[in-house]
């Protein structure tokens, strides 16, 4: 199914000339070894880099990789698409020995020797290190050195860079990192200067997801663009970028992390009774089953079995939870949160809540990253997409256009005012229900030219029709600037009291 402007509703549009970095933007995809059977249908040529995950560092510094995936075969396949290949070391489950491995700060550290050999033997373009987390607990098997992990990590990376240069030549192999929402910590406090890391690392991939989940008391967005003051975790996509660039990491060496999945939890009450609030009480610590691939997983450190609660985008689509990218299936209610700029789903009969990403939320994040001068985007994970709906949104937004891959829905059903009156059983989450939260915002359209793409604005999340009843264009006040959006083809923006909607133009 293709995406049209009508189905995206608020897909953020911008010109390629406005963002000089777009043409050189990196698009990095993580590809898990245990999903080797799902490489069929993945177009690796659409990515600039693929990170194969995960290589497992052992206590002695040796490196192993899942033997169910043939490295020569998959690396050859990816290289055949003119895409670079790295192996990512660590991850949540396999960061156990990083603390001890980097404590050897000498140039002859066996771990460094083994990385160099691993890169050479497998014809890799570099190595990605996903240490979760330096100076932090991570999983229960880790034994972090709260004071020394971060400085030791820096010295290790400096030595690794020197070893790469000595073996392969300057700039021939990449060193990259997956990093948390905040800079590395020392004794529990994020450091304020990461510039020395940036001198020896080519780029860092921000993990701007898994921000809220079953570990919280309330439901909330897995990957919020912005956090809601006073609600759930006070971190977000935007705060992560600010934290790293504020600590001296060049924006051009950052890649924005995008989740091609969502997380499910179980609410305690019927969330449709307060449909504009995605922060409601939930069963803390209880994770319901996610999609059809989710199963009981035993934590290697505690042996406790649980579900992940993960819903991959492809299974939200092929299991009918979403009948198209912006419409919920018959037993689900879809909402849009204007602060986090993310959709969420609720099933009143099971009280299941799912926070996830869709083309609209992905486009908002990519646009923001480009505005901030980031060097690219990173996806977890490539096999989670559905007919390239999310990846094509990333690429189209980078290239300066609107994604066109959705459904044709009757805009007469998309009025924002219809939202509050809709019964759950009849609810059809049309593209424009995304903006139901603006019906309380007071604004006046005066027909002036002040509402221009990129012009300053003062009322965050205010919406204004470009020309009431005559034009499809409307404007969203986002981060202090008007952002031009568009209704679906053949429809126009209509002002109705204190709300806007998209509908057919009047013929009278």
Image (cartoon, grey):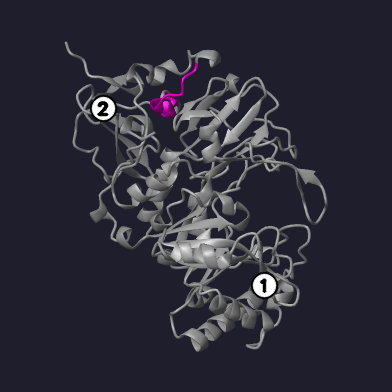
Please, what secondary structure does the residue beneath circle 1 have? strand
Residue 288: quadrant of the picture: top right
Which residue is found at the position 70% from the left and 58% from the top?
93
Give the x, y percent position of residue 411: 33, 20
**Crowd class of label 2 (few under 14; some 14 to 19; many from 20; radius 10 Å):** few
Apparent side of residue 150 relative to residue 285 in the rendered image (left or right): left
For disc 2, the marked residue is 445
Q: Quadrant of the C terminus?
A: top left
Q: Main secondary structure of the magenta part?
A: helix
Question: Which stretch is magenta?
Answer: 427-436
Q: Around disc 1, counting alpha carbons within 10 Å, would you say few (fewer than 14), some (14 to 19), or many (20 or more)?
A: some
- In terms of image quadrants, where is residue 478? top left
Name the one closer to the observer, 116 or 13.
Answer: 116
On the question of residue 279 being in view, the answer is no
- Residue at the image point whose x is 57% and y is 40% from the top: 221
Where residue 203 appears, x then y in whole percent? 47, 68
Residue wearing tag 1: 63
Q: Closer to the camera, 203 or 483?
A: 203
Q: In the rendering, at what x and y percent does residue 53 appear?
A: 59, 61
User: What residue do we see at 73% from left, 70% from top?
Assistant: 97
């Amino acid at each position: 199914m293709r995406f049209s402007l009508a189905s995206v509703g608020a897909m953020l549009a911008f010109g390629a000339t406005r963002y000089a970095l777009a043409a050189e933007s990196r698009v990095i995809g993580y590809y898990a070894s245990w999903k080797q059977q799902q490489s069929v249908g993945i177009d690796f040529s659409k990515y600039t880099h693929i990170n194969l995950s995960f290589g497992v560092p052992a206590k002695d510094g040796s490196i192993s990789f899942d033997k169910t995936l043939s490295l020569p075969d998959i690396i050859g396949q990816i290289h055949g698409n003119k895409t670079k290949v790295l192996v990512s070391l660590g991850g949540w489950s396999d960061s156990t020995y990083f603390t001890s491995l980097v404590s050897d700060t000498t140039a002859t550290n066996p771990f460094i020797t083994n990385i160099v050999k691993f890169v050479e033997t497998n014809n890799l373009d570099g190595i990605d290190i996903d240490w979760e987390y330096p100076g932090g607990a991570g999983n229960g098997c880790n034994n972090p050195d709260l004071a020394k992990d971060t400085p030791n990590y820096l010295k290790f990376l400096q030595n690794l860079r020197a070893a790469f240069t000595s073996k392969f030549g300057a700039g021939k192999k990449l060193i990259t990192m997956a990093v948390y929402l905040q800079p590395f910590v020392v004794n529990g406090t994020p450091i304020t200067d990461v510039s020395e890391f940036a001198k020896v690392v080519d780029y860092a991939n921000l993990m701007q997801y898994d921000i809220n989940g079953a570990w919280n008391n309330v439901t909330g967005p897995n990957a919020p663009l912005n956090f809601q003051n006073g609600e759930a975790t006070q971190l977000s996509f935007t705060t992560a970028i600010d934290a790293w660039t504020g600590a001296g990491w060049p924006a051009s060496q950052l890649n924005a992390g995008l989740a091609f999945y969502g997380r499910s939890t179980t609410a305690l009450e019927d969330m449709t009774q307060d449909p504009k609030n995605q922060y409601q009480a939930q069963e803390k610590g209880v994770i319901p089953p996610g999609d059809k691939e989710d199963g009981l997983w035993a934590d290697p450190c505690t042996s406790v079995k649980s579900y992940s609660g993960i819903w991959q985008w492809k299974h939200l689509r092929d299991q009918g939870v979403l009948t198209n990218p912006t419409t919920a299936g018959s037993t689900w209610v879809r909402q849009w949160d204007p602060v986090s700029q993310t959709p969420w789903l609720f099933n009143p009969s099971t009280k299941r809540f799912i926070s996830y990403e869709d083309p609209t939320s992905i486009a908002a994040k990519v646009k923001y990253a480009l505005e901030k001068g980031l060097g690219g985007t990173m996806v977890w994970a490539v096999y989670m997409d559905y007919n390239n709906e999310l990846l094509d949104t990333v690429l189209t937004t980078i290239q300066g256009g609107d994604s066109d891959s959705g459904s044709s829905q009757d805009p007469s059903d998309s009025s924002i005012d219809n939202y509050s009156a809709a019964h759950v059983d009849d609810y059809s989450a049309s593209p424009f229900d995304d903006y139901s939260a603006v019906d309380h915002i007071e604004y006046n359209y005066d027909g002036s030219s002040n509402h221009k793409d990129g012009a300053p604005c003062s009322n965050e999340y205010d919406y204004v029709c470009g020309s009431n009843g005559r034009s499809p264009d409307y404007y969203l006040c986002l981060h202090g600037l008007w952002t031009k959006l568009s209704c679906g083809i053949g429809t126009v923006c209509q002002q109705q009291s204190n709300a806007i909607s998209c509908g057919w133009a009047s013929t009278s």
